[in-house]
Image: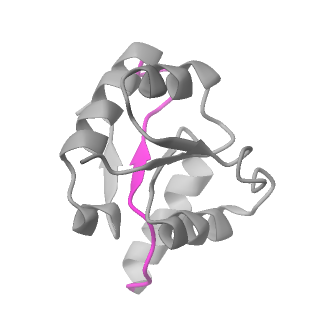
Amino acid sequence: MSLPLYMDVHVPLAITRGLRRRGAEVLTSQQDDMAKLPDDQLLKRAAQLGRILFTRDQDLLAEAAKCLRKGEPFATVVFARQLDVSIGQCVADLEIIAKSATPEEAMHQVVYLPL
């Protein structure tokens, strides 16, 4: 069983396509008509959908950290710096996360790539 992923607007299409080729269930914020949502609302949207949120946006990472400090519920955020982690490494690591994480791990965590 694979946990579904949610991609924010900053994620290159090559990552989404690579994951789909590997059988991961991926929804982009653009496909969900949520590309213009503020970061705090995007976190809530991913949680509503039961999806792990992948981003390369440091502002979204800061929003997740704020939720963590306040004890507020939020979707697990997987973060990779744009210049530090290649597209191929993102695809490989996200595939591992999607295919091995439990539903409980889809909430209230921040994970950094590379693994």
Q: Is residue 108 above or below residue 101?
A: below
Q: Residue furthest bottom?
A: 71
Label count reads: 0
**Left or right position of 1 against 4:** left
- Given residues 36 and 68, the one toward you in this image is 36
> Residue 23, how many percent across, how many down?
37, 29
> Residue 22, how many percent across, how many down?
36, 23
Q: Is residue 14 above or below residue 94?
A: above
- Given residues 105 and 110, the one toward you in this image is 105
**Left or right position of 23 against 115:** right
> Residue 53, how many percent across, how many down?
48, 52
- Given residues 82 and 98, the one toward you in this image is 98
Which residue is rendered at x = 34% and y = 70% of the image?
108
> What secondary structure is the magenta-colored segment mainly?
loop
Tell me which colouring the rendered structure shows: one colour
> Residue 17, how many percent across, how many down?
54, 22
Extent of the magenta region? 71-86
Q: Quadrant of residue 31?
A: top right
Which residue is rendered at x = 45% and y = 58% of the image?
51
Magenta run includes residue 84: yes
